[in-house]
Image: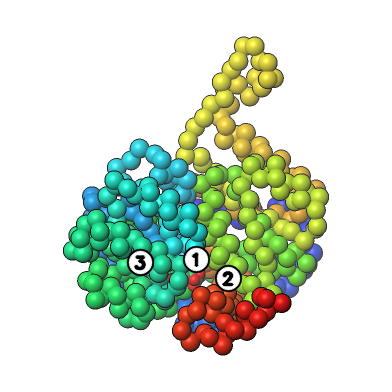
Amino acid sequence: MTLKINDKYIKDFLAAEDLAGIEPSVKCAIAQVKNKNGLGNDFLGWADLPVNYDKEEFARIKVAAEKIKKSCDILVVIGIGGSYLGARAAIEFVKSPMYNEKKKDTPSVYFAGNNICSSALAELIELCEGKDVCVNVISKSGTTTEPAVAFRIFRELLEKKYGEDGAKERIFVTTDKARGTLKAFATEKGYETFVVPDDVGGRYSVLTAVGLLPIAAAGCDIDAMMAGAAAAREAYSNDTIENNDAAKYAALRNIMYRKGKTTEILVSYENAMLMMNEWWKQLYGESEGKDNMGIFPASVIFSTDLHSLGQYIQEGRRNLFETVINIEKSNDTVIIPNDPANIDGLNFLSGEELHKVNNAAMNATLLAHVDGGVPNIVLDIADRSEYSFGWLVYFFELACAISGYTLGVNPFNQPGVEAYKKNMYALLGKPGYEAEKAKLEARMSK
Ligand code: PA5
């Protein structure tokens, strides 16, 4: 098993009958995923994706990735939410959070269109000066404002630099197979396109072209990633909590929620998990936070955040539980040197691997937080390989669907995301929003 759940540090917070009590609901949720008869059941394509994906497109992704590798120094990936977080998480997890700064024979990968910050975009444009650039614009709907604005700017930049035909060779579009402005635009311009399958929502799409093209362009092995996801799919095919760790994680989260633990903190001791944390927050936040329900997903990197949020977690409001990702094998070995003078008193650590110290910090924190009344679920994962990434993605996606159904929500929609968009369009004077604009301006001037 690439991933193992360790429930030692949550056991004291569970009553004897808790798991048995929730099992019928969890089994029912698993059946809803398997039989595709629950809410949002037309968005369950991710469940079989590791074995049932478009092989022709997969081969085309690899060819496009090679073309990108050969023709640019910088790949700009334009997308927001589920259309960028997975790729960014994968590159940082498998390669490094410092991937762009490292010496390498693959392009640097920068992400744009995931905010509307002028400085962020201006700085990226400046960074692209004098460099060869390719763009992968990703939007399932093809209408999201943030990536659409960034794409307009980068398209102009590429067309000025390479001419319209040259730019065409450097622009790759990932969108719906038929609908949306972006699809129409790509067809008109003749850009190479990749498909976001109809039955896969944004936050479940990392193992489609959405994630795979940028991930492959960064030099990651996407075959190994799919193999990891396929192995996880197989491993979590049982419908009992005892024999299915994804179901167990979903069960434990719901038990915690019912006991008033309304915030879950995803904890890691590896900096390479930072963007994976962000991906996880979107997955669980958008899937469960609705109908006035849902666990609030937060995240930390320890030991860094033990010196910022550690105080709150140890002694603040007791509505928290933690899920700790324990990456067993570090990618790197750092040995603490001996110092004959021992002025800092650290010679008891001379010759030790830094990873061992990190492990000690993890175990010490687990015990301290449990003593402080914070239940902890531990997920032991072998390493930061592509295979492990694929496994972890599938584990979290399946657990999220089971958890959402157990909670009683539709884990595949995100109606709440529209509220700010509608107001923004109105405030910016988009045609058709005139009445709304007047109402909002009246509220703002009060
Ligand atoms: O999970 C989701 O569906 C969302 O987070 C979307 O990925 C996000 O809003 C971007 O949408 P789109 O890909 O249509 O531009």
Q: Which residue is mark 2?
A: 286
* Relative vertical location of residue 242 with respect to residue 201 in this rendering, above or below: above
Q: Which residue is mark 1?
A: 81
Residue at the image position 48 percent from the left and 87 percent from the top: 432
Q: Which residue is mark 3?
A: 152
Give the Cα distance between marks 1 and 2: 10 Å
Tell me which amino acid carries mark 2: Glu
Tag 1 secondary structure = helix
User: Residue sitting at 70 percent across and 45 percent down?
Assistant: 308
Q: For mark 3, does the 10 Å Cα neighbourhood hold few (<14), some (14 to 19), or many (20 or more) residues?
A: few
Residue 8 position, x and y percent, is: 70, 52
Image-based side of 328 in relation to 346, left or right: left
Q: Secondary structure at mark 3?
A: helix
Q: Amino acid at mark 3?
A: Arg
Question: Which residue in the rendered view is the most extreme toward the left?
Answer: 165
Q: Quadrant of the C terminus?
A: bottom right
- Residue type at tag 1: Gly
